[in-house]
Amino acid sequence: MDQQLWQKCVEFHGHECPGLAIGFKACEAARKKLGVSFSKDEEIVCVTENDACGVDAVQVITGCTLGKGNLIYRGTGKQAFTFFRRDTGQKLRIILKPRDDNDKLSKDERKKLILESPVEELFEFKNPSFDLPKKARIFNTIKCTKCGEGAPEHKIRIMDNNPVCLDCFEDYSRGW
C-alpha cells in the first residue's frame, strides 16, 4: 500500500475511516485494471454513485473533481464508482461487495481490513450500463427575473413567460 498517498487522502478528508479506505481501494482497482492515473483535465471521468467519504480519495488520487466536470454524482447511494478513460474508451464499474460481518467490526478494524484486502475480494467489476458522459460545457448566464441571480441557461425555467432559476420556479405537477 502506498502510505504516502493514503496520508495525502487522510489530510484532504480530515480523518481516517472505512469510507475513505473504500474510495482509496476503488482507485487502486482502477489503476490496476484500467491504468488510471491523475487526470489534469478530463482524460479520466469518474461517476460516483454516492456522496460519502470515499469520493474524497477519488478526488485526491485521480484528479476527478466536480469543478473540472470529470467527477459526476449519480445518486443511487451505492458504494460504486465507474471510471472511464477518454483516450482508450475503456470503462469499468467497481462495486463494493456487501459483507455480513460489518456490524461485528470496529471502525478501525473495518478500515484495516479494507486497506489490507486485495481489490478482487472487496469489489465486483462490471461493465457500466451507461455511457461516458459528455465533456463539461460552459453555458450562458441568464438573470432570474424573480430573484435577480444568474444561473446557467440549462438550469433556467420559464414561468409566466419570464426566465426564472430553479430556486424561484414553482413546479406544477398533477401526479406524474
Image (cartoon, rainbow, N blue to C red):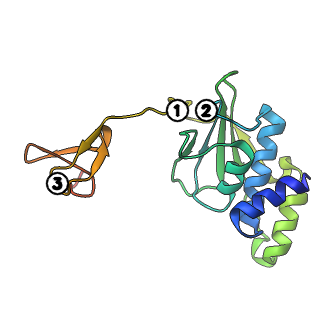
Residue ID at (31%, 38%): 154
Q: Secondary structure at mark 1?
A: loop
Residue ID at (89%, 51%): 118
Contact, mark 3 vs mark 1 (Cβ under 8 Å): no
Cα gap from disc 2 to disc 3, whole angstroms: 37 Å
Q: Secondary structure at mark 3?
A: loop
Residue ID at (7%, 48%): 160
For marks 1 and 2 on the same chain, the one whose residue lies earlier in the sequence: 2
Q: Position of residue 152 (x, y in %)?
A: 32, 41
Q: Position of residue 103 (x, y in %)?
A: 75, 76
Residue ID at (58%, 39%): 70
According to the image, label 1 marks what residue? 133
Left or right of 8: which side holds 82?
A: left
> Any mark on residue 172, and which?
3
Q: Nearer the viewer, residue 60 or 23?
A: 60
Contact, mark 1 vs mark 2 (Cβ under 8 Å): no
Q: Which callout, 3 or 1, points to the residue nearer the camera?
A: 1
Crowd band around label 3 with a 10 angstrom C-alpha radius: few (<14), some (14–19), many (20+): few
Cα gap from disc 3 to disc 1, whole angstroms: 29 Å
Left or right of 45: which side holds 69?
A: left
Q: Position of residue 62 (x, y in %)?
A: 71, 42
According to the image, label 2 marks what residue? 42
Q: Secondary structure at mark 2?
A: loop
